[in-house]
Amino acid sequence: MPRLRPCLDCGTLHLYPSRCPVCQSHYERSRDEFRGAASARGYGYRWRRLTARVLAEHRAVYGNLCPGWMREPHRAKVLTVDHIIPRAAGGSDERSNLQVLCRVCNSTKHTHVDTA
């Protein structure tokens, strides 16, 4: 039987990891107001098309292999495209500034780079 969890915001019991659907919606809306929507930050249609092409090229050569970030290469179910030099730090969407990483490596890199 699935385990019910309390919502971080309202305390309602639900099946989701942190927030109930209503509170998650409010959280995402406030986050987007603070950060700006993805398309406003440059991650709209062109970015999605570019990442699809980069992922297709990577998979054609390496399959679902993540090259790893501070760890050995490994198989991954979900691959993402990451900026080597983040856009916020002046990086571009040029192919030479993009790399393919799994979600775990991308998150690790993001956390490490932001705290360094």
Image (cartoon, helix red, strand yellow):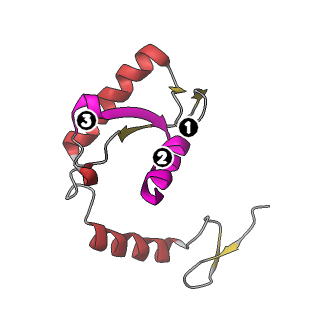
Q: Are the residues tagged 1 and 3 within 8 Å (C-beta)?
A: no
- Magenta-drawn segment: 93-116
> Looking at the image, is mark 3 or mark 2 nearer the viewer?
2
SS at mark 3 in the image: helix
Q: Quadrant of the N terminus?
A: bottom right
On screen, 19 above or below 82? below
For residue 113, side relative to residue 66 (left or right): left
100 in the magenta segment: yes
Q: Earlier in the sequence, mark 1 or mark 3?
A: 3
Residue 70's label in the rendered image is 1
Q: Residue at x 61, y 65 (%)?
A: 16
Q: CA distance from mark 2 to mark 1?
A: 8 Å
Check disc 1: other Cα within 10 Å, few if <14, some if 14-19, many if 20+: few
User: Of label 3 and label 2, which has the lower sequence position?
Assistant: 3
Question: Are the two marked residues, 2 and 1, in contact with CB atoms closer than 8 angstroms?
Answer: yes
Give the class, few, some or many, for how many residues have Cα within 10 Å of label 3's Cα (few <14, many ≥20). few
| Crowd class of label 2 (few under 14; some 14 to 19; many from 20; radius 10 Å) | some
Badge 1 amino acid: Met
The structure residue drawn at horizontal position 24% and vertical position 41%, both measured from the top left corner, is 47
Specify whether 87 is left or right of 106. left
Give the mark, 2 or 1, whose residue is nearer the N terminus.
1
Residue 98 vs residue 46: left or right? right
Q: Secondary structure at mark 1?
A: loop
Residue 9 at x, y percent in the picture? 54, 82
- Label placed on residue 21: none
Q: Residue furthest front?
A: 116
Q: Nearer the viewer, residue 112 or 36?
A: 112
Q: Please tell me which residue lies in front, 37 or 101.
A: 101
Kind of element beneath mark 2: helix
Mark number, residue 109: 2
For mark 3, what is the residue?
A: 49
